[in-house]
Image (cartoon, rainbow, N blue to C red):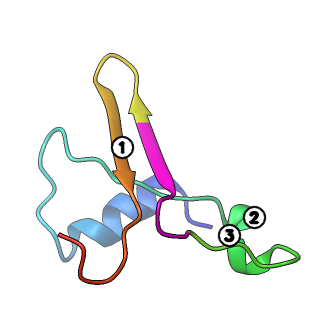
Amino acid sequence: MFPPTELVSRLSQTLTLDPGDVISTGTTAGIGAKQTPPVFLQPGDRMEIEVESVGILRNSVGTRGDA
């Protein structure tokens, strides 16, 4: 929805961005609420973000109160 330059501009108005910071965005066409039927993340689902030459960040969806 917004070009990267606008995202950085808006974020930098309220946050201090440092070298190496990652701004993660999604795709508006891919949001689960707009699918038929709607699809949402569930406990146990895993998300991965990979940056070439840096590595992979993996997170699992837990339930409220999980540590």
Name the residue: 16% across, 56% down: 17
- Extreme top residue here? 53
Number of numbered discs: 3
Name the residue: 56% across, 59% down: 26
> Dot 3: few (<14), some (14–19), or many (≥20) neighbours within 10 Å?
few
- Tell me the quarter of the image containing the C terminus: bottom left
Circle 3: residue type: Ile
Circle 2: residue type: Ala
Name the residue tied to disc 1.
58
Give the magenta-colored segment's residue range: 42-49
- Above or below for 32 versus 59: below
- Extreme right residue here? 36
Name the residue: 56% across, 65% down: 2
Q: Are marks 3 and 1 in contact (CB under 8 Å)?
A: no
Name the residue: 29% across, 47% down: 22
Residue 29's label in the rendered image is 2
CA gap between label 3 and label 1 equals: 19 Å
Q: Secondary structure at mark 1?
A: strand
Side of 16 relative to 61 (left or right): left
Q: Secondary structure at mark 2?
A: helix
In the image, residue 13 lies at what x, y percent?
22, 74
Name the residue tied to disc 3.
31
Looking at the picture, tell me which residue is in the foreground, 65 or 39.
65
- Above or below for 30 versus 37: above
> Dot 1: few (<14), some (14–19), or many (≥20) neighbours within 10 Å?
few
CA gap between label 3 and label 2 equals: 6 Å
